[in-house]
Amino acid sequence: MIVRLSPTGRRVAGAILLAIALHVLGSILIDGYSSEFTVRSMLVLASLLGVASIGQTLVVLIGGIDLSTPFVIGFANVVAAQLYGDGMNFVLVCLMVGVLALVIGAVNGALSSTLAIHPLIVTLGVGTAIQGAVLLWTAGFPAGSAPETVTKFVSIGGHAGPLPVPWLVPSFLVVIAIISVVLARTPFGRRLYAVGSNPSAAPYALISPRVVWTTTYALSALFAAAAGVLLLGFTGSAYGDVGQPYLFQTIAAVVIGGTTLVGGRGGLIGTAAGALVLIEINTLLIGLGLSPAMVEAALGVLIIALVSLYGREPHVRATI
Amino acid sequence: MTEASGPSPPRLTAGQWFTRQIGRRRETSFALGLLIVLLVINVLLNPARFAPAAWGATIGLAAPLVAASIAATPAILGGRGGIDVSVGPLMGFANAIIVQALIADAGISSPLAVIPALLAVGVLAGALNGALAAFVRIQPIVATLGTYLLFSGLTLTIVPAPTGTVPPWIQSLSGQLSIVPLAALIIAWLAIKQLPYYDQLMAVGSDDRASYTAGVPVAWVRFLSYCLTGLFASVAGLLLTALIGSADPNVGGGFTLLSISAVALGGVSLAGGRGGLLAAVVGAADIFLLQSALTYFNVSTFVLQIAYGLILVASISLNGMTAMFERWIATR
């Protein structure tokens, strides 16, 4: 049987095959690349990046971009640690951080869509202000730590029932599955794709781009905040700049996963594969003994090479 | 004398009249107003820094950001997501090339050798970005993100830690002669504006499909816009080198987002085809004066950061609101 895939389907399949190919390559080149510990840590790192990239995917699907992701991650990381350290109930802490993140995201989306300002600038400005506020609050020296539950949830050595991975990994996959179904099967999901495909036609289908933008950006900030709290459990202590590598990595994961930045095409399964590809490349390069500087340079070259394989845009003449 | 015949000019709507009164580009007029206010505040707060005797040093302080913003502009003008996020790391790369590779390792310190080599590096780096974005057709933000990582990785390999010194002629570029490289950039831009290329760039940025059907070589026009961005970014790297007087692998990257904020504030449309050098310079000057005024109050850098973020959002929002108001007026 021949399975016919849409262009997006081909890109997602490409990303998954790439992750597998990279893993095989790593196992051939590097001793111990397929050891249990390495595989486990790669899955945990990919899930952490994946959680942060969920929001970025949704935002890119509606034709936007969210540069506030690293700042919201840092915000959630520091605020959660600080409040929990002050003796607040952790569930309450998560609720507060979540609500604040939703508000931050909603401001991003509402401002960009209502005033027709490029989201790049809005999210950058809001993110910068948030980071400044957090730094001011903690005087630059955040304190506190994560509760045991969160640490166990993300610990590389953890077990999810019979599975040899911490609960983070299966939970991430379940969340991805749920959101994929929501995107494909619910009115909300269809509205999201409609706004992304053609923002000026959407209102004729009685879809308000403003509402879609506001909710989607709010969700994006919520997932960034979740990543921030999970990272708190992973690293053990609060750090305001913990999200900085995620600024470009989330965008790279989204694009490698086959979601196009013009909006309307793509999905979360690709993004999960894209996150895994990035972590595989990073592990492979470090395993080959490259210096951190050379790892960075090689990562740049590889991202370009990968995207040029299957993420190219159409020629102008094809768009007329 | 006879009166000019032909149809009388169309009556302007209130919105068009309003726009015409305050200047050609409303966003830039807004940024210009902000510039004047900020300049007055700065001069009142800190007369010593803005006295004529200190102009050289003050311009030298602002020059890297101004040049970075000029550099960010051509790629953005090309439209369809055109943007170059590698401007900052390219400045850092130029800094490392000048101080470490040319001056320390090869012993070349004559401006006649350093400047052409630097410009060549800039054009080549820009050509790489341009080829990836225009010919390979990778989404520009991803292509230049790749080269962002490449350039910053190479910079860290050449200069793992801050090091080196610069000859007097480079030092003077952050002092008495600080206006020279900026003037060179402005003259270069004005010259480009005289070329048919400039019209093609603005046409491609406004509507690439119409331009393509009109026979404009869209891909080449975009490719050249990245070359210009790379060229200007290398000059920005020279100005950065003059200001810090050494090689530092960590200072370049920050200029990417600053320069993009500056051009957006100045009124360069991130959708392409609208804006230019004046917008970029005014936006960059706004951000510099804002930072300078806030620093004077001796507030913590954290407050500085909050204020900077909020003012960026507020001014862009005001711009957006004015645009909505004008559209509303135009429909009256």
Image: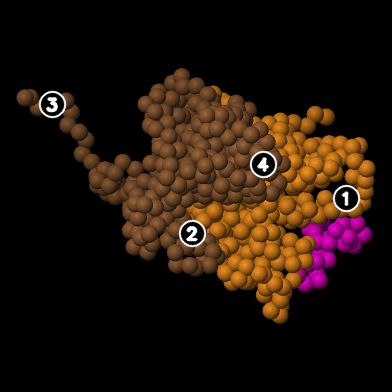
Chain colours: A orange, B brown
- Label pair 4/2, CB-CB below 8 angstroms: no
Secondary structure, mark 3, is: loop
Residue lying at 34% horizontally and 52% vertically, measured from the top left: B52
Query: In screen coordinates, is A215 left or right of A282?
Result: left
Neighbour tally class for label 2: few under 14, some 14-19, many 20 plus, Cα within 10 Å: many
x and y percent of residue A29 in the render? 89, 37
**Numbered disc in front, either 3 or 4:** 4
- The image's mark for residue B155 is 4
Secondary structure, mark 2, is: helix
Q: CA distance from mark 1 to mark 2?
A: 42 Å
Q: Earlier in the sequence, mark 3 or mark 4?
A: 3
User: Mark 4 belongs to which subunit?
Assistant: B
Q: Are marks 4 and 2 on the same chain?
A: yes
Nearest the viewer among B99 and B287 is: B99
Residue lying at 71% horizontally and 76% vertically, measured from the top left: A85
Secondary structure, mark 4, is: helix
x and y percent of residue A291 in the render? 78, 44
Highlighted magenta segment, given as a residue range: A146-171
Judge whether B148 appears above or below A105 on screen: above
Residue lying at 44% horizontally and 43% vertically, measured from the top left: B178
Nearest the viewer among B108 and B89 is: B108
Q: CA distance from mark 3 to mark 2?
A: 52 Å
Read off the residue under disc 1.
A38
Query: In screen coordinates, is B113 left or right of A21?
Result: left
User: Mark 3 belongs to which subunit?
Assistant: B
Nearest the viewer among A100 and A300 is: A300
Question: Which kind of residue does numbered mark 1 sit on?
Answer: Thr
Read off the residue under disc 2.
B308
Q: Are marks 4 and 1 on the same chain?
A: no
Q: CA distance from mark 4 to mark 2?
A: 28 Å
Read off the residue under disc 3.
B4
Question: Which kind of residue does numbered mark 2 sit on?
Answer: Tyr
